[in-house]
Image (cartoon, rainbow, N blue to C red):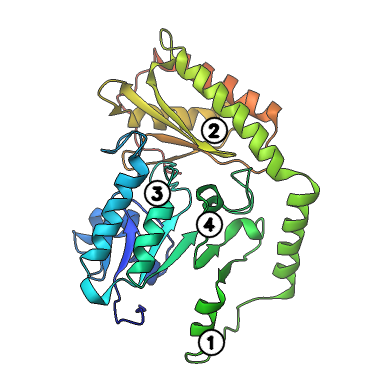
Amino acid sequence: RGQNPRGGSRCLVVEHAYHGHTSAVIGLSPYKFDHRSFGGRGQPEWVTKCPAPDLFRGPHRGADAGRRYAEAVAEACAAEGEGGVCAFFIESGMSVAGVLLPPAGYLASCYEAVRAAGGVCVADEVQTGLGRFGTCWWGFEQQGVVPDIVTMGKPMGNGMPLAAVVATRRVSDAFAAGPEYFNTFGGNPVCAAAGLAVLEAIERDGLRANAAATGQWLRAALQALRAEEASHGAVVGDVRGAGLFIGVEFVRERASREPAAAETSWLCSRLKDEHRILTSIDGPHDNVLVIKPPLCFSRSDAEQLVHALRSELVGMRGADLAGVTATPT
């Protein structure tokens, strides 16, 4: 646990955030420390949760949502007084929270408040980095901000164990001034070669452009499916995302937005069992179908997915969902 030059050690996170499995980052992950197994005692005393910027279910859904959600972060900073805060951690695209993208202006306002309070801004790009959004290499670029620290992981090695932390010179100099750090397993030539090959393939094969084009088509097709309200599209409450980072939120009734958790589990299982299509389920209500395919996912693949989903939505109308349990993903 660190602290800023003023002595402040408080870290800010957003609701439902997930930053990893080590004891330190579990303490920064409400998705983990709010689990019932902790009996309400999982949240560290030095961590403050701020509302997740949810434009579908949250209290702020209009054009000023970014500013209004950021006010909660500014208030958390102000509450720490002269000591200020240590850091603000946020995923550039919040998958476990239900595939939430920060609304316009949100990160800029949050970063301004955190830095004024002496803290650093950390962008978790493990799931969204390396071109998944299509139009940019890193999710935070969509917001026009520059973090102090960026974390990245799994996609870097395309299956090989590889991760990295990138920081500003000011942060890295402060780290270097501390006790010597070394790690026997901190890197090896094989994984480094895999990482370089991944970067080369993304550029050579135009995978960012593919993510942008295929993702745009797929979101439009899913929105069209949602518009088929009279038949089977009524359960599709929202379609959101960027590039090949897409969430489809299912509801039992659009006006109330009652989460359709059983229906989402049924669809996820059917896509796997009947069509050999892998998706996952996220969101605090377990009702968001998450689509995060490899960046080589093609228009043909996307058409197959939409066809399969439409077929299963039709079939679900007559299905008995009484015995459906949560699908582990």
- Contact between marks 1 and 4 (CB within 8 A): the answer is no
Mark 4 and mark 3: Cα distance apart in space: 17 Å
Q: Earlier in the sequence, mark 1 or mark 4?
A: 4
Residue sticking out furthest to the right: 204
Residue under label 4, please give it: 125
Q: Which residue is mark 2?
A: 272
Quick one: quadrant of the N terminus? bottom left
Q: Which residue is mark 1?
A: 176
In-front residue for pair 58/5: 5
Q: Label 4, label 2: how many angstroms apart (C-alpha)?
A: 27 Å
Task: Name the mark on residue 141.
Answer: none
Pointer 3: what residue?
Answer: 106
Residue 170 lies, with reference to residue 230, above or below; the image says below
Nearest to viewer (mark 1 / mark 4) = 1
Residue 238: x and y in percent read: 41, 28
User: Residue at 39% across / 12% down in the picture?
Assistant: 318
Q: Is residue 272 above or below residue 87?
A: above
Sequence-first tag of 3 and 2: 3
Q: Is residue 128 visible?
A: no
Looking at the rendered structure, the secondary structure element under dot 3 is helix
Q: Amino acid at mark 4?
A: Glu
Q: Are marks 4 and 3 in contact (CB under 8 Å)?
A: no
Amino acid type at mark 3: Tyr
For the residue carrying disc 4, how many other residues have a C-alpha within 10 Å: few (<14), some (14-19), or many (20+)?
many
